[in-house]
């Protein structure tokens, strides 16, 4: 059983990196608006299909297709925020949750009608033969997933703690009224953060297409897993969410990869662990691993 453990740990890092790229954007928008965007996984799915459209169907280069998909997703993010979220922010935090559920259903239906419901994958010109190192088999795409996720998170950390946008985000998150009185334009920051969130999710969807496959129904699953990762790490905590994503990927891979006395779980059961983690965290530590308890008045 221990012979396969290094491979399972490596696979966990790949899965956790994809989850982290998806859920980090969700944590960003929640920290700013205190709204759970239930369409986040569906936006990730649409990003993957936009890349599929430009790269596979229209036969543009991967770089050009990525830029075109980013522009399309930025527009989708701005329109989604304008129609499905901002009109309801002042009314109730529950209403945007309901409207984003509707947005997710609309996006899934449009993609299903446009591209069909069959499973799709991305062709790659990169050598796909596995590389063996210290008993671990890996592909260039898997190394790209890990390396690019690390670079993005370092860049995200620099933006959040050094750039004016990051300081504005933290100011609005801490005290919106005070930040606005100091001249910080909260609506502009909101749109900027939401588009960054959409682009992170779209990139994660593209990586999923290269690593495994994509389908229109994948959005709901990734939304749930993003919520599970954010709950595990702490609501609104970006670094806690990244940590929660890595833990979720670890739990999923170890649960289906290890042999427990001759018994192993089927691979189809791994998606259930997101729900189990949500229940356990809510019962044991509702504030998450890196979250803090709200102070009572």
Image (cartoon, helix red, strand yellow):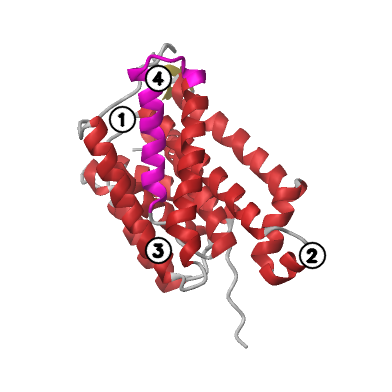
Tell me the quarter of the image containing the N terminus. Answer: top left
> Which element type, helix, strand or loop, lies under badge 4?
helix
Q: Which residue is mark 2?
A: 182
For marks 3 and 2, the one nearer the N-term is 3
Within 10 angstroms of label 3, few (less than 14), some, or many (20 or more) residues? some
Q: Which residue is mark 1?
A: 213
Q: Which residue is mark 4?
A: 55
- Asked whether the residues under the numbered discs 1 and 3 touch, taking CB atoms below 8 Å apart as contact, a structural biologist would say no
Q: Which residue is mark 3?
A: 97
On the image, the x and y values in percent for residue 63 come to 51, 19
- Asked whether the residues under the numbered discs 2 and 4 touch, taking CB atoms below 8 Å apart as contact, a structural biologist would say no
On the image, the x and y values in percent for residue 290 come to 58, 62
Q: Is residue 2 visible?
A: no
**How far is mark 2 from mark 4, CA to CA?**
45 Å
The vertical placement of 148 against 261, above or below, is above
Q: Which residue is found at the position 45% from the left and 26% from the top?
A: 142
On the image, the x and y values in percent for residue 277 come to 38, 60
For marks 1 and 3, the one nearer the N-term is 3
The stretch of residues the image draws in magenta is 39-64
Q: Which residue is found at the position 42% from the left and 57% from the top?
A: 84
**How far is mark 3 from mark 4, CA to CA?**
33 Å
The vertical placement of 219 against 28, above or below, is above
For marks 3 and 4, the one nearer the N-term is 4
């Amino acid at each position: 059983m221990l012979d396969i453990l290094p491979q399972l740990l490596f696979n966990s890092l790949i899965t956790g990196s994809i989850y982290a790229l998806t859920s980090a954007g969700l944590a960003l928008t929640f920290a700013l608006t205190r709204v759970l965007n239930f369409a986040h996984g569906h936006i990730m799915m649409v990003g993957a299909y936009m890349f599929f459209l430009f790269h596979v169907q229209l036969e543009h280069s991967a770089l050009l297709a990525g830029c075109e998909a980013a522009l399309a997703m930025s527009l989708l993010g701005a329109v989604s925020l304008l129609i499905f979220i901002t009109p309801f922010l002042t009314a109730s935090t529950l209403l945007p949750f309901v409207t984003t559920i509707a947005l997710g259903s609309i996006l899934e239906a449009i993609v299903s009608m446009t591209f069909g419901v069959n499973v799709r994958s991305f062709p790659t010109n990169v050598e796909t033969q596995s590389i063996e190192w210290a008993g671990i088999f890996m592909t260039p795409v898997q190394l790209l997933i890990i390396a690019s996720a690390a670079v993005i998170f370092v860049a995200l950390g620099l933006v959040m703690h050094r750039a004016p946008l990051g300081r504005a985000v933290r100011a609005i998150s801490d005290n919106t009224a005070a930040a606005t009185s100091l001249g910080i334009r909260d609506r502009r920051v909101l749109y900027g953060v939401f588009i960054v969130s959409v682009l992170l999710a779209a990139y994660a969807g593209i990586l999923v297409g290269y690593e495994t496959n994509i389908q229109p129904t994948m959005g709901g699953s990734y939304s749930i897993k993003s919520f599970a990762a954010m709950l595990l790490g702490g609501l609104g905590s970006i670094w806690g969410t990244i940590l929660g994503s890595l833990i979720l990927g670890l739990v999923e891979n170890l649960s289906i990869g290890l042999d427990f006395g001759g018994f192993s779980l089927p691979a189809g059961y791994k998606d259930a662990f997101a729900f189990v983690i949500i229940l356990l965290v809510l019962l044991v530590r509702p504030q998450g691993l890196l979250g803090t308890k709200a102070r009572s008045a």
